[in-house]
Image: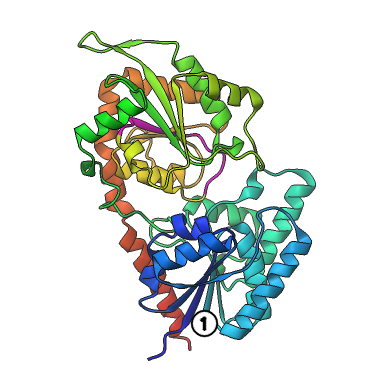
Amino acid sequence: MTKHKLIRITTVPISLDKLLSGQLAFMNQFYKVIGVSSEKEYLEQVGKKENIEVCHIDMTRQITPIKDLVSVYELYRFFKKEKPFIVHTHTPKAGTVGMLAAKLASVPNRLHTIAGLPLMEATGNKRKLLNFVEKITYSCATKIYPNSFGLQEVILAEKFCEPEKLKVLGNGSTNGIDTSVFDPEKYSLKENSISKEKLEILPSDFVFIFVGRLVGDKGINELVEAFGELEIGDWRLETGVIKKVKLLLVGPLETELDPLLPETLKKIESNKNIITVGYQNDVRPYFAIADALVFPSYREGFPNVVMQAGAMGLPSIVSNINGCNEIIIEKHNGMIIPVKNTTAIFEAMKKMVEDVDFYNDLKQNSRKRIVENYEQQVVWNAILEEYKKLEENV
């Protein structure tokens, strides 16, 4: 029996690789999957990893009308040639050009997953433009999948599309998490001691970790300022040992889109208690040596980082934004704080360090919460079920 063609599109291949890791290979058992993105060399690596076909089409993450029209045309030609049964897009730009091209090419099933809305931080004419573009994307799609209930509420409030087009799959998330991979038991005390020693972290240090792009809208400016206040204090353990704090930043520093403030960069460079390790293909060893995640982002869809940290047994301090406030339950597996609030970040971090019983209670619940609600196979099966429903209408 010939498999239906399923085309999955992201603006850049790192999204196919990281946000949808393993899912494309899983879907390839049931459909002929083709991955489409920019950055040809990286895309081809993803194709080999997932054992799927790929097609390189240039797309940009910025507002570039002429280049975007070229992308629409190239995708249109590709769809007319391949005649896919489903085109499923992710990330904002890929959603817009992909859904428009799929509509023009008369692709019967045009699906778009929403994993965050950049427009939430925009104002004035830019916000109006992004709202207009968002509505175009939704109008061209046959189904919209917000990856959190909070995002669904925002979409309805903004009236981007009619309610019947929207559906949150399961408990949310785009890809779920493989809790057999993100498991703290995979890392021994000896391995963790060696990792800490390399980074000059003492056994008694309390390590806060951030994982993600080092940009303004991830709350890094506020986090670094709050940490500067926090490290002034000392906390004496029952054993008499003085506990110090460290901040471990794992992720690439982006200087083009939403760069950090100059004073933040100076603090990061000059503070020996702030450790930066750049982009890491495998973040698990860093979670394994940390004590808590701090993720003060301004906007998210359904953040993988918070699920990963939880699966690795870490409680989290997160902003009160959609996705984050669905994964974290206040005072159960973490703390929820106001957005863009340096004082709130400081107070939450201080509470984690000072109140040992409180911290241990959060830690005890962290992995259990993820295992019970966001196991990866459950999410994959929910997406596959959506695809299979479309076949019933053929």
Asked whether, in this view, residue 47 is left or right of residue 288, the answer is right
**Residue 322 coordinates in the image, percent (x, y):** 50, 46
View extreme (top): residue: 240
Q: Amino acid at mark 1?
A: Phe
Mark 1 nearby-residue class (10 Å; few <14, some 14–19, many ≥20): many
For the point 44% across and 76% down, the residue is 387
Along the line of sight, the residue nearer the viewer: 374 or 38: 38
Q: Which x, y percent locates residue 120?
A: 64, 46
How many numbered discs, if any?
A: 1
Residue at the spot 34% in from the left edge and 20% down from the top edge: 353
Q: Is residue 267 above or below residue 389?
A: above
In what element is the residue under mark 1? loop
Residue 290 locus on image (x, y percent): 33, 31
- What span is in magenta? 289-300
**Does the segment drawn in magenta span residue 293?**
yes
Name the residue beneath numbered marker 1.
85
Q: Is residue 204 left or right of residue 302?
A: left
Overall secondary structure of the magenta stretch?
loop
